[in-house]
């Protein structure tokens, strides 16, 4: 449940649902190199998120015809993560005021997940834009917290537009630069330098 704390290593932690996980240069898993992940769920049993900056060349309209015109530019599928790449998760940014709607599960503010089995015509006036992800990133109990403790991820606040940027390849350095200070310097870290 969002907002519920969980005990990690004897201390309570708050839910990170709605936060960004930004891969540090120390993270060596090629599935997550220079990725920005939006956590759509973080509960005592684990966490689930989608990679925001791995666009494919497959148009949303080719796979989900009825949803294609709601997809934000670039209107293509995104690689959401290595888990269940044949499944789809849809993020939506709703128009204000955000209402409780069947098929929409709020993650943070105007952003949430959208059930793709719902008729898009019923949601059209409420949905500003969508982004569709093939697969997702998942962590078991305590796994994400351990990766954060090991220095693999920066946990940062998300802005409403982060999941819908027009240039997803620029998201990793953009998010780091807006933090300022030493975090901004990491945005310029060369991709081919190994950390020990």
Image (spheres, rainbow, N blue to C red):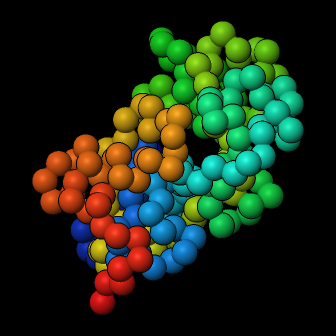
In the picture as drawn, the residue positioned furthest to the left comes out as 181
Relative to 141, say whether 125 is above or below: above
Whole-percent x, y for residue 29 in the image: 51, 77
Relative to 35, say whether 129 is above or below: above
Q: Can residue 167 be seen in this view?
A: yes
Residue at x 42% of width, y 31% of height? 160
- Locate residue 193 relative to residue 169 in the image: left or right: left
Residue at x 24% of width, y 68% of height? 11
Residue placed most toward the observer, 9 or 86: 86
Whole-percent x, y for residue 37 in the image: 48, 54
- Locate residue 17 relative to residue 139 in the image: left or right: left
Relative to 59, say whether 46 is above or below: below
Whole-percent x, y for residue 33 in the image: 48, 69
Residue placed most toward the observer, 183 or 41: 183
- Locate residue 188 relative to residue 107 in the image: left or right: left
Q: How many labels does the image show?
A: 0
Q: Is residue 114 visible?
A: no
Relative to 180, say whether 154 is above or below: below
Residue at x 52% of width, y 45% of height? 168
Residue placed most toward the observer, 119 or 102: 119
- Locate residue 87 relative to residue 185 in the image: left or right: right
Residue at x 63% of width, y 49% of height? 55
């Amino acid at each position: 449940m969002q907002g519920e704390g969980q005990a990690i290593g004897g201390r309570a932690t708050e839910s990170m649902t709605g936060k960004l996980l930004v891969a540090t240069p120390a993270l060596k898993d090629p599935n997550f190199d220079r990725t920005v992940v939006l956590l759509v769920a973080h509960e005592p049993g684990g966490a689930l998120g989608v990679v925001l900056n791995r666009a494919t060349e497959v148009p949303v309209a080719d796979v989900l015809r009825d949803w294609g015109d709601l997809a934000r530019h670039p209107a293509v599928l995104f690689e959401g993560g290595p888990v269940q790449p044949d499944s789809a998760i849809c993020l939506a940014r709703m128009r204000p005021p955000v209402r409780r709607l069947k098929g929409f599960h709020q993650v943070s503010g105007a952003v949430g997940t959208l059930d793709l089995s719902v008729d898009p015509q019923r949601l059209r006036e409420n949905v500003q834009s969508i982004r569709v992800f093939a697969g997702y990133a998942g962590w078991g109990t305590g796994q994400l917290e351990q990766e954060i403790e090991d220095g693999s991820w920066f946990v940062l606040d998300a802005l409403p537009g982060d999941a819908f940027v027009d240039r997803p390849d620029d998201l990793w350095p953009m998010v780091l630069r807006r933090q300022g200070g030493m975090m901004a310097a990491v945005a310029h870290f060369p991709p081919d330098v190994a950390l020990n």
